[in-house]
Amino acid sequence: MRRIGVFVCHCGNNIAGTINIEEVVKEISEYPSVVYVTSYRYMCSEPGQNLIVNAIRENSLDAVVVAACSPSMHEETFRNAVKRAGLNPYLCEIANIREQCSWVHEHDKDAATVKAIRIIKNIIAKVSKNEPLHPVKVPVNKKCLVIGGGISGIQAALDVANSGYEVILVEKEPSIGGHMAQLSETFPTLDCSQCILTPKMVAVSRHPNIRLLTYSEVIEVSGYVGNFRVKILKKPRYVIEDKCTACGDCEKVCPVTVLNEFERGLSVRKAIYIPFPQAVPSSYVIDEVNCLGLNPLICGKCKDACDANAIDYDMRPEIIIEEVGAIIVATGYDLYPKEKIAEYGYGEIPDVIDSLEFERLLSSSGPTGGVIRRPSDGKIPKTIVFIQCVGSRDPEKHLEYCSKICCMYTAKHALLYKHRVPDGQAFVFYIDIRAAGKGYEEFINRVMEEERIVYIRGRVSRVFRKGDKVIVWGVDTLTGKKVEIEADLVVLAMGIVPSKGTKAIAEILKIPQDEWGFLKEVHPKLRPVESPTTGIFIAGAVHSPKDIPDAVAQGSSAAAKAIAILSAKELIHEPTVAVVDWTLCSGCEVCVALCPYSAIRITSQKKAEVNEVLCEGCGTCVAACPTGALQLKNMTDEQIESMIINSLEG
Amino acid sequence: MIAFLCNWCAYAGADLAGVSRLQYPPNVIPIRVMCSGRVDPQFVLLAFSKGADGVFIGGCHPGDCHYVAGNYKTFKRVILLKKLLNQIGIGEERLRLEWINATEGKKFAESISDFIEKLKRLPPLRYNGGRLDE
């Protein structure tokens, strides 16, 4: 038989003004197992709390009900008070007789009093069956995994490493750098992209706390926060990274030529290649799909040419197992596939290109040495048309959302074009101009006014070839007139979509994706970098389209969250979890599929087992369990049923 | 009438109704659960058998469940429960499922008031003159 103490708060007049406190105290004192009842004006105050502490000690109370405001206000306060008195805090429950009683039934004081008594009896019934619980303590592995080596992942890795924790940075391409490495200049400062990126890339490669795994992919993740077990597949380069001097002798003799992905197909590379000159790690790699055979009997020319003896055809894929405490996903974006928008002739007309291809034309280390040339005949275009919102802001056929960065980079492209082709004419078709960042509006104004680029507000309906020109048909909605431009080159600002590997990584990490495939955060306003799985964080464009400042900020933000986990001595998890009674469990597995946190597994004895660290205590599995084997600690079926009965009695 | 309210949305919405001093009839006793997905259909049937005239379940809006998908389970369970209630003569109008988030204090007060109004107009629950649990 429990010895329960009930403490009724007047809350000034907030409760006492509507509810008859004396009657409540009288009724409750007659309830079985209640050995002590009292009331006080402000229970949450220090004297109020001391009242509770002393009452517990003096009356050997083993459970406490505080009838006051909502538990969302002071449950923690009262639980701490109870802890001070030496009682387990989970043996203290709150009866809400203010927000959901006195404040909403001000006109019917009798009914409010009756309801208050029922509510308190409910909570007494619940707490009588509460078990003392202890927070689950979880040890923490002090390593962090960062998936994705673009600017966001690089920033996250550096921030975690600089805080003294080990980082494993996994990148699936042979070099880190992501799309930022392909850019020529960045808006609005017109900084050379490579110049601001490469110092960070080098910092990553030199950092004593960062283990860089390029040409690698995460293939499996198990475990939970503080204790993730990660399987990484390191693909063979067939070139020993440490020995390669990047001299390029191998490349010269390789007989195989394929399209260069880094150059977006505008130029070619060999089967043995380095992604770009500033690649980190600075090492060549053999593309085994296109190489003639990785076999000296078939070819072997690169191996013969290599003075450093860095080529090794016998390399095999390696599986690397790592244990980490936190994971950051920063796998970036790709452009909306051009093939999906046939009206603009992309893929069919060689002189219709996308924005990343234009970046490569602008880049001094690009396929044209920084001279803007048409892909078809290499001539310098004198009339260039930029089309914004290609694929974006189109709820009917393509992407409903705005890709955020295209207005800015198109302005940048137009400006850089005018600097290099001063006698050229640039046109930009736009719907709106979105320039919300720092210095962005000023940049757009400069482009429009100083550089004398023609901005046409309207969409393009068709792009087609006529001779060696590209005809663009559009409309100027501000004048209401149709527009036809004979262009030499057309650049499409394609929409931003999550990178190709996002679906696979989302499935491995169990991060939900939104309808467009972007990874979903717990709360878009208050918790933008946390995924629903504790310990796994999201940063950069894989979350939503964003510019470099935001990608960097999010990388740092995710790093801060990861550091909070890694720096903890141990992690504390709420113990109000689900637990299985094996005498009742039939192994039907209904619960396993229901759990959104994958916290339940079936053991070899065909019984369900709940991982108390992963379980968040929602109780969905408990409601579904056909035998009642699953129960939620301190919220069992028995407790809820007694609450129901108490509510309806009398 | 019993109201099962999920901690993160409906219960918080009910609290907000209180903070805003919105008034509604006192016939409802709230029971706080962490997720509307915790509500076992057995609880609903038990409530009716012990004399409840109606049962109200408040959960997060679809897509917003604090525990990702618990409210979807509730939704499915309520559909089946309603069919069952019709078959055994209690009637689906005595069970109400509402999506109420933490900012919808007004919606909570209005839903409860409306539900109680509708329940008052229904004949009392009796089975052959006795109570349902006999």
Image (cartoon, coloured by chain):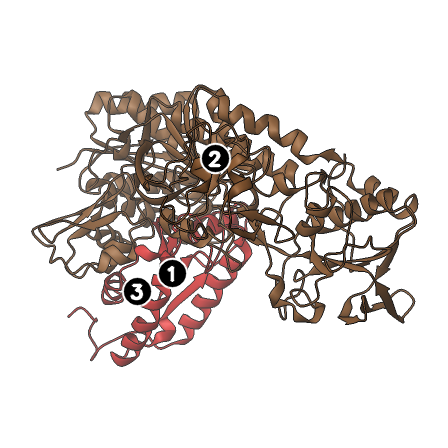
Chain colours: A brown, B red
Q: Residues within 10 Å of mark 2 (few under 14, many from 20)?
A: some
- Observer-nearest of A486 and A35: A486
Image mark 3: chain: B
Dots 1 and 2: beta carbons under 8 Å? no
- Observer-nearest of A420 and A117: A420
Figure check: A600 above or below A201? below
Three-letter amino acid code of the residue under disc 1? Ile
- Residue B57: image tag: 1
Image mark 1: chain: B
Residue on which disc 2 sits: A305
Three-letter amino acid code of the residue under disc 3? Ala
Horizontal arrangement in the rendering, residue A575 relative to residue A206 (left or right): left
Figure check: B114 above or below A264? below
Horizontal arrangement in the rendering, residue A541 relative to residue B63 (left or right): right
Residue A644 coordinates in the image, percent (x, y) = 26, 56
Q: Earlier in the sequence, mark 3 or mark 1?
A: 3
The image quarter containing residue B2 is bottom left
Image mark 2: chain: A
Q: Secondary structure at mark 2?
A: helix
